[in-house]
Image: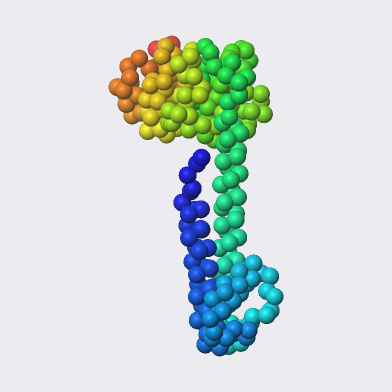
């Protein structure tokens, strides 16, 4: 089960505070005779709770109403704060629930999927290189999967008939289900240098004989990855592209010289 997000906790506390504000304010003002239907007697706490719930739910039966300016201002603040916080909380909680459902669906590994996890190629990340590579492997009929945390890219690849899974590539527990120990090759394509290094560490801890290719987004990342694990094949796409462009521009001039 996923832990509650900070937003959900904040909104939960905010809703509780609004209820406390509504009940306490109604109880005090009602005891001072500033509400119709409330008297300074012992049942005011129940009535204050009842009024707060009815007001925040926008039902408004009208049996308890403010009769002074102070009470009316209090109710206006209660309604504006309560309704806005409640609607925002519903939107956040609903979004968290849908996200967890989507991630659970895309990250689920069925018994059929597990048959793929033997001498397979694992593409981790969905930057441009891995996207092109996925298309090439599909055309070749290779056995491969794509692991990503990008929902948009995940849906794009899935619509193309590619086996793609939503997962956190920096989590060993997430990556274990893709049987990296049985993989033939692993390609790491992350635009975040530090994340690429972390993914490499996880992949090396889980994989046995798999050939690992790490795409370095920068020259500095290339040096760090090579120093981290010399057996890893490190490729810097930007460097390769720059050399290809240089050859395209100056190739003929070099031959003439």
Q: Position of residue 149 (x, y in %)?
A: 52, 34
Residue 136 placement (x, y as % from top left):
59, 17
Is residue 242 visible to the viewer in this orientation of the structure? no
Q: Nearer the viewer, residue 106 or 246?
A: 106
Colour scheme of the picture? rainbow
Q: Is residue 55 visible?
A: yes
Q: Furthest-left residue in view?
A: 227
Q: Using residue 142 as the reference point, say whether residue 227 is left or right of it.
A: left
Does 127 sit above or below residue 113? below
Q: Residue at x 57, y 74 (%)?
A: 46
From this viewpoint, which residue is outermost toward the front?
Answer: 42
- Residue 173, position in %: x, y? 45, 29
Q: Of residues 14 and 64, which is closer to you in this image?
A: 64
Query: Considering the image in quadrants, where does the C terminus appear?
Result: top left
At horizontal 52% and vertical 16% (from top left) the residue drawn is: 121
Which of the 4 quarters of the picture holds residue 104?
top right
Q: Is residue 209 above or below residue 59?
A: above
Residue at the image position 49 percent from the left and 15 percent from the top: 183
Quadrant housing residue 65: bottom right
Q: Residue at x 37, y 28 (%)?
A: 197
- Please count the marks in the image: 0
User: Is 195 left, or right, of 109 in this rendering?
Assistant: left
Closer to us: 72 or 210: 72
Percent x, y of residue 255: 43, 11
Above or below: residue 64 compared with residue 151: below
Report the side of 49 relative to 59 (left or right): left
């Amino acid at each position: 089960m996923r832990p509650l997000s900070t937003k959900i906790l904040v909104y939960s506390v905010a809703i509780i505070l609004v209820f406390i504000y509504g009940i306490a304010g109604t109880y005090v003002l009602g005891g001072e005779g500033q509400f119709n239907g409330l008297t300074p007697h012992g049942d005011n706490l129940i009535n204050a709770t009842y009024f707060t719930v009815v007001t925040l739910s926008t039902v408004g039966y009208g049996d308890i109403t403010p009769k002074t300016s102070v009470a009316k201002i209090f109710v206006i603040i209660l309604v504006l704060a309560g309704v806005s916080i409640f609607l925002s909380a519903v939107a956040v909680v609903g979004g968290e629930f849908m996200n967890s459902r989507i991630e659970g669906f895309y990250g689920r590994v069925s018994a059929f999927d597990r048959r793929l996890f033997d001498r397979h190629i694992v593409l981790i990340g969905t930057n441009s290189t891995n996207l092109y590579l996925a298309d090439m492997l599909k055309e070749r009929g290779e056995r491969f999967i794509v692991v990503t945390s990008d929902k948009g890219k995940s849906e794009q690849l899935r619509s193309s008939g590619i086996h793609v899974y939503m997962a956190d590539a920096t989590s060993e527990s997430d990556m274990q289900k893709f049987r990296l120990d049985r993989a033939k090759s692993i390609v790491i394509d992350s635009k975040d240098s530090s994340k690429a290094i972390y993914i490499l560490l996880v992949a090396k801890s889980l994989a046995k004989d798999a050939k690992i290719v790490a795409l370095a987004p920068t020259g500095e990342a290339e040096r760090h990855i090579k120093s981290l694990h010399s057996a890893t094949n490190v490729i810097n796409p930007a460097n390769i592209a720059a050399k290809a462009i240089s050859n395209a521009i100056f190739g003929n001039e070099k031959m003439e010289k």
